[in-house]
Amino acid sequence: MNGYIALKTITLSGVEYAAGDSIPADAVLPSRVPALIRTKSIARANNEHPVEAQKTAQDGANDVVGVNLPIQTENGVLDLPASEEDIVKAVEVMQMNAEDAAKAVGDIESETALIIIDACESRKTVKTAVKARAEELNAVADNEGDDDQDGQQDPDGGDADGTGTEGDTENGGDE
């Protein structure tokens, strides 16, 4: 893997990268790559055409309007770039009753919104639905031919996105 280019200021493992900076491949958790690319936080570096990769970084640097949310995890603080839409969707879901929220989570396409809900939500029904939806989205991303993803769980046994969700629901969970 050639690495990535920061499309906007982002902090990964305590190292801050400004828009246009090169990011080593090992600085990004493989399970977070799809979400960071979707939120236009990073782009894959193109070593064959570095000018094009740099242009992509410059063009995309200001596309997403939002904020970086400090999400507390068991491994420290995750600096999560979130768009206005992600935040609004998360707040909408968290205001619903548990049953409606769990159903609404099934329609969410944004991993960032799911992380926000998981970090702020305390209802088990909703947290279970969030985890199941995140696994669905990751399975879809893994099946879209992303050759640098191996579909493996994070080596520490937890989830690799650092959201702090626990447990093994590899077989769909029986809760």
Image (tube, grey):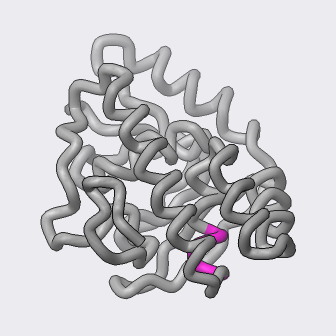
Q: Residue furthest front?
A: 174
Q: Is residue 119 left or right of residue 104?
A: left
Single out the residue that lies furthest toward the left.
155
Q: Residue at x 74, y 54 (%)?
A: 104
Q: Which residue is rendered at x = 50% and y = 46% of the image? A: 36
Q: Residue at x 35, y 63 (%)?
A: 173
Q: Quadrant of the C terminus?
A: bottom left
Quarter where residue 155 is shown: bottom left
Q: Give the image location of residue 13, x and y in percent.
A: 35, 70
Q: Position of residue 158 (x, y in %)?
A: 26, 71
Q: Give the vertical position of 172 relative to 137 (above or below).
A: below
Report if residue 97 lies within the magenta region.
no
Q: In x, y percent, where is residue 65?
A: 80, 49
Magenta span contains residue 119: yes
Number of numbered discs: 0
Point 65% across, 81% down: residue? 120
Q: 3 or 153: which is nearer to us?
A: 153
Is residue 63 or residue 92 the one in the foreground?
92
Q: Read off the magenta span.
A: 116-120
**Quadrant housing residue 119:** bottom right
Decide whether the magenta segment is chiefly helix, strand or loop: helix
Q: Is residue 174 above or below residue 24?
A: below
**On screen, residue 42 above or below 11:** above
Image location of residue 77, percent across then percent down: 47, 82
- Quarter that holds the N terminus: top left
